Image (tube, coloured by chain):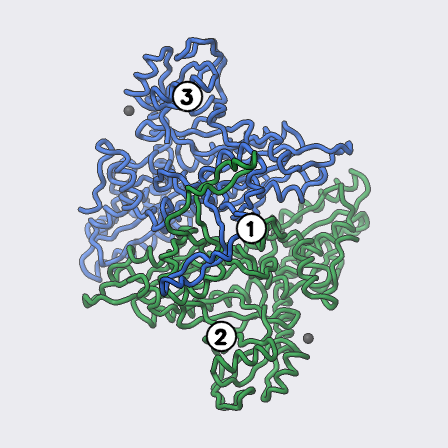
Chain colours: A green, B blue
Amino acid sequence: MSKNLTKREVDYSKWYNELVVKADLAENSAVRGCMVIKPYGFAIWEKMQAELDRMFKETGHENAYFPLLVPKSLFEAEEKNAEGFAKECAVVTHYRLQNDPNNEGKLRVDPAAKLEEELVIRPTSEAIIWNTYKGWIQSYRDLPLLINQWANVMRWEMRTRLFLRTAEFLWQEGHTAHATKKEALVEARQMQDVYAEFAENYMAMPVIKGAKSESERFAGADETYTIEALMQDGKALQAGTSHFLGQNFAKAFDVKYTSKEGKQEFVWATSWGVSTRLIGGLIMTHSDDLGLVLPPKLAPIQVVIVPIYKGEEQLEAISDKVNVFVKELRKKGISVKFDTRDTYRPGAKFAEYELKGVPVRIAIGKRDLENNTVEVARRDTLEKQSVSQDDVVDVVANLLEEIQDNLFNKAISYRKEHTTEVNSFEEFKEAIKNVGGFVSAHWDGTIETEDKIKELTKATIRCIPLDNKLEEGKCILTGKKSTQRVLFAKAY
Amino acid sequence: MSKNLTKREVDYSKWYNELVVKADLAENSAVRGCMVIKPYGFAIWEKMQAELDRMFKETGHENAYFPLLVPKSLFEAEEKNAEGFAKECAVVTHYRLQNDPNNEGKLRVDPAAKLEEELVIRPTSEAIIWNTYKGWIQSYRDLPLLINQWANVMRWEMRTRLFLRTAEFLWQEGHTAHATKKEALVEARQMQDVYAEFAENYMAMPVIKGAKSESERFAGADETYTIEALMQDGKALQAGTSHFLGQNFAKAFDVKYTSKEGKQEFVWATSWGVSTRLIGGLIMTHSDDLGLVLPPKLAPIQVVIVPIYKGEEQLEAISDKVNVFVKELRKKGISVKFDTRDTYRPGAKFAEYELKGVPVRIAIGKRDLENNTVEVARRDTLEKQSVSQDDVVDVVANLLEEIQDNLFNKAISYRKEHTTEVNSFEEFKEAIKNVGGFVSAHWDGTIETEDKIKELTKATIRCIPLDNKLEEGKCILTGKKSTQRVLFAKAY
Ligand SMILES: [Zn+2]
Ligand SMILES: [Zn+2]
């Protein structure tokens, strides 16, 4: 059938692109590099948002909203940040269209409506937010300031892929201000923990918590904390970052507070974000050649029920049975779809829900009616079992938990098998090439070595794990002294 | 104290602007006409969003997300729509900044990064969405398509006011496609009903449901349905609109479906939206010279508890009592803040929560401890009562309902007092000038007359009420025949 996907072994990248479109998650739009997030894909994003938003609020943050556009003069105030994003900024230069006198029915930019100062569409909001915080922070009583924003941002990337790298994407960006360096560091690490907890407990996607090397740091940050996940093709995905910004933005925007002791001090800052990129990570952690596999905690539909019947009468008899346990399942907070469309056959429905990654499928036909059973199939292992209608609610509730755990454990196993410790550059190249995944190796700490390794192998330093043990060793490339291993991988 | 507002009688417009800023709802930003929505203001928007989103989903709609930017060639495809918005479009012309060679540390637009086709920041999304729907709709089985988007949009308005009219604003926009004209009309009216229900039941803001006259219709619509509210200064506010778009966008973007009979037909469309403008309406419906007054159903904090104490020991004794009923209140789903900050005095706290419109304030001091009482104050009437601690949960729960009802009834009374039926142009001018509010009058149905009346009185036709009785009469301006009255008012 036309829904068949390219197999992962054949072409992982093609498999991914096809899956995103065929599972109705997203598609490319008429605007270069910008995607349309379709209702099913957006429903996953809404589930992610709901959990993250709850976690942000539980850690004391409030939501707010800041302008989409940033005046160029503000944008350039923090030089490193500006330099980091200048090359991918969409720029608004005019504020009006007019009828094109040479082309009836067409519009053109009105040359008389040129802005005095150009406006940049936010690639990230530090500049506009810190310019605002200047007015909000006077005294130590105004600190900490703990704010999050859900927003769209724009980075004019040259090579884009649905969810993973798009010119416009949706994200949340936290921006906090603190009286002390220590508090800001604690906040940055706390949010990294929140991201890790979300990735592991909701996405069933194991992550390594680490710090970025200098060359991979966020532009304008003194330290970038990251969570790094491993995809099925052995490539790493940076899934979320939390930045300790030092006093860089406070100094660029002159944000000071009066301390308890009456002294004027610059404040300390963090920022942190995750985006619709997470959906790409979710897909590439669990899915298979039949389509999407979703962890139950983020599945818009957790259970689908497909009736197998001939004629209205049979459907009615089935519906009478189904409605009983649908009610029970919903009472337990489980989202259920009973698909009674008569415009599609059961086989087509099975394929559709497999493609869309619905965790549990229940089928019920004439013989099940006679035997008081249903057929329960799980999407992760594709196993089926016959279950008494009396037990179906409990079986399904347990199964959802089991699937959530199984997906996480499978991903952990995969990561274990694809993490290699090496002690020479030969071993390193071998591991990157033949095993893939994370390679743990000593590095001399310089940008030059990092660049050289990237040039030779395409692998980059994903992070310096936070739980690293200190250990003497020699840089795999230069042989210089090193005190700890770092994790390399090819990455998205 | 510095938080004192200008009185409404003295300068309503100044009162509004001060209130928005002092109650921490929003403020102007560094970007012309764009606001920062502060956490307290955003929390009100989140409450609005949650209810509206639930109502949209209950009526069968799903959320999705479409690109921020619209290529000029798509934007101009539906001519009337393009014409209506061309004059207020922010236009992206370049996709990169570079170091300014003449100005160290500064950036400039990279002239080499000029886009081949300019991109417009969406002022509304019909164009980009209908261009997408073309790929989604082939057969009658794909209809109806019921989609909503929560997004930011941009309209380059020359005169802006916080919440009421800003260059960037947040809104939702529903965009639906249907097989028949009748279905589309039913949908457009249904969403007008949803908006009216939300306005009245949640915002406690009575609205008139009507249709717009031709000159006030959405650009590209065949019919615009509106809900019109009346503000305290006698001016009307268009609070939400729902458009029947006919086949205009289907034809502009060539969106056809194959009917059950195998015929190719253009689809029928609606779009509908409400925005952060609603917060402006909320403020101007209920608030007073002391500050914001919020209906309980949309108040981020429904109940605030202020302890009045000397020393840690008294605070502890008070807290022991308070914690008991806080728990009970929260169990009932009531949001409660217990404000134990020692950096502010009770009087300052009272003023702050009055300014912020918290519906119920509970104060508890030493004498209350002795008497087993608390003082309960309601924000709408400013009445206070002493209540036994044993009854406080029930009293507060009832009070919240009473306040919600009282606010609605007050607004209804105000509207009754400020709705005048007139039969001559003298009476009309008199009513517009001296009474304000809605004026119900006969009109000959022509745009010329509507324009002339606006020129002479600044009043516009707000709507042709849907429940209008047919009645013969003469146009107040021209004396020509008319079959029904319409509602005029000065408007925001
Ligand atoms: Zn492998
Ligand atoms: Zn009056």
For label 2, count other residues whose C-alpha is less than 10 Å away and answer few (under 14), some (14-19) or many (20+). many
All told, the count of numbered labels is 3
Disc nearest the viewer among 1 and 3 = 1
Asked if residue B404 lies left or right of residue A468, the reply is: left
The chain letter for the residue carrying disc 2 is A
Residue at 59% of width from left, 50% of height from top? A36
Disc 1 from disc 3: Cα separation: 41 Å
Q: Amino acid at mark 1?
A: Glu
Q: Which mark is residue B451?
A: 3
Disc 2 from disc 3: Cα separation: 66 Å
Residue at 72% of width from left, 42% of height from top? A341
Asked which secondary structure carries label 1, the reply is strand
Q: Are marks 2 and 3 on the same chain?
A: no
* Tag 2–tag 3 contact (CB < 8 Å): no
Disc 2 from disc 1: Cα separation: 42 Å
Residue at 64% of width from left, 74% of height from top? A413
Q: Which mark is residue A210?
A: 2
The chain letter for the residue carrying disc 1 is B
Which circle's residue, 1 or 3, is located before the other in the chain? 1
The chain letter for the residue carrying disc 3 is B
Asked which secondary structure carries label 3, the reply is helix
Residue at 19% of width from left, 68% of height from top? A261
Residue indicated by mark 1? B116
Question: Front-most of B423 and A331?
Answer: B423
* Tag 2–tag 1 contact (CB < 8 Å): no
Residue A164 visible within the image: yes
Q: Which mark is residue B332?
A: none
Asked which secondary structure carries label 2, the reply is strand
